[in-house]
Image (spheres, grey):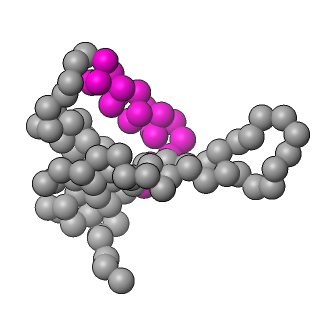
Amino acid sequence: MQMLYQSDSFIVVQFDVPAGEPQAGPQLNRGGFEIVDKFARKEIFIEGALAESFQQGVQALIDEGEPSEDELDAFIEGYAQMGLQPVVMH
């Protein structure tokens, strides 16, 4: 688990989980991103193709120059709107 981004509106955490026992050959990883919308108090975990799309979108913003917090928040909001899971503190 690695915190990638935090603003007044969002938190983005990356999870990399090794898939099973070590084997000969390439290792598969299963992971994704958890996005927490602080204002809506909702979260979503994205993985697979959706997580790849998210990662590529963030990389494109970075490749264009140093994105502002507003630009990053606007991009993240598009994914965060899919969040239905309420944030619950334990």
Residues shaded magenta = 45-63
45 to 71, vertically: above or below? below
Name the image quarter holding residue 77: top left
Q: Is residue 59 magenta?
A: yes
Number of marks in the image?
A: 0
Drawn side of residue 83 relative to residue 34, left or right: left
Q: Position of residue 5 (x, y in %)?
A: 29, 47
Drawn side of residue 46 relative to residue 31, left or right: left
The answer to whether residue 82 of the structure is visible from this angle is no
28 to 43, vertically: above or below? above
Q: Position of residue 66 (x, y in %)?
A: 20, 24
Q: Name the one closer to the observer, 39 or 62.
A: 62
Name the image quarter holding residue 63: top left
Please identify the residue farthest to the bottom as the structure is shown: 90
Please identify the residue farthest to the right as the structure is shown: 24
Q: Position of residue 55 (x, y in %)?
A: 41, 33
Looking at the rendering, in which quadrant would you find the C terminus?
Answer: bottom left
The answer to whether residue 10 of the structure is visible from this angle is yes
Which secondary structure dominates the residues rendered in magenta? helix
Please give the name of the residue rendered at 80% of the width and 55% of the height, measured from the top-left corner. 21
87 to 19, vertically: above or below? below
Q: Is residue 56 magenta?
A: yes
Please give the name of the residue rendered at 34% of the width and 66% of the height, measured from the top-left corner. 85
Please give the name of the residue rendered at 51% of the width and 36% of the height, measured from the top-left corner. 49
45 to 90, vertically: above or below? above
